[in-house]
Image (cartoon, rainbow, N blue to C red):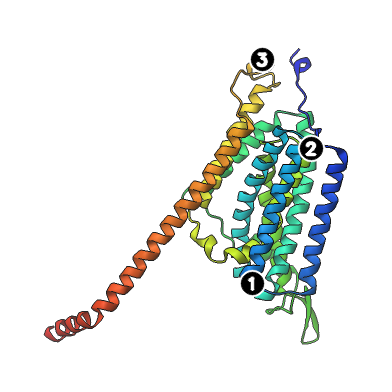
């Protein structure tokens, strides 16, 4: 009886097929061109170049959202915006870990772009695979939202609990690989293999790519359940992920040390993950078909619509960003005033210290 009342989650889109196919082709072409530019001319982009690229990708995402509003409907357009913002915030968190990895392996500046781009491609591959698997599971087993929701809430707690920060140095996988394969101590441009004293060895660049790949895999475990909490359209899920990852390497050079100043970013991301986790559990209860919950009947709980989700995501990120910058500026002013005061009182203070030393 409960199974007969099952409401199938629609995974089809109201968007024209030519738009979906054309969008996928265009996105792949843009990514290939971006990758080709890095391979042909590895360099550290200027602030102007990085700003233009980031602005271009953000504008492209907004134009794409506008096209969905026009060709589809308000629901799909709102879902894309909420999904894109969610994935963008998670991608910035991902980028922060990339910064730690590149710094720990001392990757030469000229080849950081190549490492970042390969990391982004790996992220797309992992997320694409997770999207296909996730969409297939959701279509057949709506109760998976209980698992997704619980995972996101647990992840949110891991973000904010004391001592919850991961160690991003040489993890267990990297240590095991170094035991098996021979590695040189130095880089050889952007190559994966080099020759040292006539012996072929791998360069540390391979370890960098493996670390980035492991990080991408872990972040995919969070990002895919999060966006499925906003939309069940596989097309919107994938394109939101692509647009969130596009321009990420330019954002790395644009933000520079700013990422380290966003102290409260993890709290904003944790709030978003917990919010979507609760939303997923409420949706699973509303569509319930598990016999041990309410006898297999749908549970009459409120559901959170996409507009509320979009508003919560925007407000959470704004509060986290503004609070981080306010605190960073306040600490910078305090340091500046301390240094200024020290410089102004330096000679007198030194004289007093000298007199006290003589008395003793």
**Of residues 114 and 74, the one drawn nearer to the viewer in this rendering:** 74
**Circle 2 is placed at which residue position?**
71
Q: Are marks 1 and 3 in contact (CB under 8 Å)?
A: no
User: Where, quadrant-wise, is the N terminus in this rendering?
Assistant: top right
* Horizontal arrangement in the rendering, residue 345 relative to residue 101 (left or right): left
Q: Do the residues labelled 2 and 1 touch (CB within 8 Å)?
A: no
- Residue at 58% over, 63% down: 255
Residue 158 in view of the camera: no
Mark pair 3, 2: CA separation = 41 Å
Mark pair 1, 3: CA separation = 62 Å
Estimate the x, y position of residue 3 in percent, counting from the top left. 77, 17
Question: Mark 3 Cα within 10 Å, few/some/many (few <14, many 20+)?
Answer: few
Estimate the x, y position of residue 322 in percent, counting from the top left. 47, 52
**Circle 3 is placed at which residue position?**
295
**Circle 1 is placed at which residue position?**
46
**Of residues 24 and 164, the one drawn nearer to the viewer in this rendering:** 24
* Horizontal arrangement in the rendering, residue 20 relative to residue 236 (left or right): right
First-in-chain label (3 vs 2): 2
Question: Mark 1 Cα within 10 Å, few/some/many (few <14, many 20+)?
Answer: few
Mark 1 or mark 3, whichever is nearer to me: 1
User: Where, quadrant-wise, is the C terminus in this rendering?
Assistant: bottom left
- Residue at 75% over, 16% down: 5
Question: Mark 2 Cα within 10 Å, few/some/many (few <14, many 20+)?
Answer: some
**SS class of the residue under badge 3?**
helix
């Amino acid at each position: 009886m409960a199974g007969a009342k099952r409401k199938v989650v629609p995974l089809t889109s109201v968007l024209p097929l030519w738009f979906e196919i054309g969008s996928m082709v265009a996105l792949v072409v843009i990514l290939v061109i971006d990758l080709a530019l890095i391979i042909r001319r590895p360099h550290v982009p200027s602030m102007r170049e990085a700003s233009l690229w980031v602005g271009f990708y953000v504008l492209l995402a907004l134009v794409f959202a506008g096209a969905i509003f026009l060709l589809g409907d308000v629901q799909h357009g709102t879902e894309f915006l909420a999904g894109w913002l969610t994935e963008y915030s998670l991608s910035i968190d991902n980028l922060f870990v990339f910064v730690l990895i590149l710094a720990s392996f001392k990757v030469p500046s000229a080849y950081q772009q190549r490492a970042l781009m390969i990391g982004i491609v790996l992220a797309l591959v992992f997320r694409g695979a997770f999207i296909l698997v996730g969409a297939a599971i959701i279509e057949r087993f709506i109760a998976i939202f209980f698992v997704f929701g619980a995972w996101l809430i647990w992840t949110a707690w891991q973000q904010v609990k004391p001592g919850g920060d991961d160690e991003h140095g040489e993890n267990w996988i990297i240590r095991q690989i170094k035991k098996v394969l021979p590695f040189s101590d130095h880089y050889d441009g952007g190559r994966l293999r080099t020759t040292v004293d006539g012996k072929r060895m791998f360069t540390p660049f391979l370890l960098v790519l493996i670390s980035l790949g492991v990080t991408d895999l872990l972040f995919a475990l969070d990002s895919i359940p999060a966006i499925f909490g906003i939309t069940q359209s596989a097309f919107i899920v994938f394109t939101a992920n692509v647009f969130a990852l596009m321009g990420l390497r330019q954002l790395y050079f644009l933000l520079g040390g700013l990422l380290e100043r966003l102290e409260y970013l993890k709290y904003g991301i944790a709030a978003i993950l917990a919010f979507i986790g609760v939303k997923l559990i409420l949706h699973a209860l509303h569509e319930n078909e598990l016999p041990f919950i309410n006898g297999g009947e749908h549970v009459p709980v409120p559901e959170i619509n996409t507009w509320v989700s979009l508003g919560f995501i925007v407000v959470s990120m704004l509060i986290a960003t503004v609070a981080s910058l306010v605190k960073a500026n306040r600490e910078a002013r305090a340091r500046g005033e301390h240094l200024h005061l020290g410089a102004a009182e330096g000679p007198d203070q030194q004289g007093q210290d000298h007199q006290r030393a003589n008395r003793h």
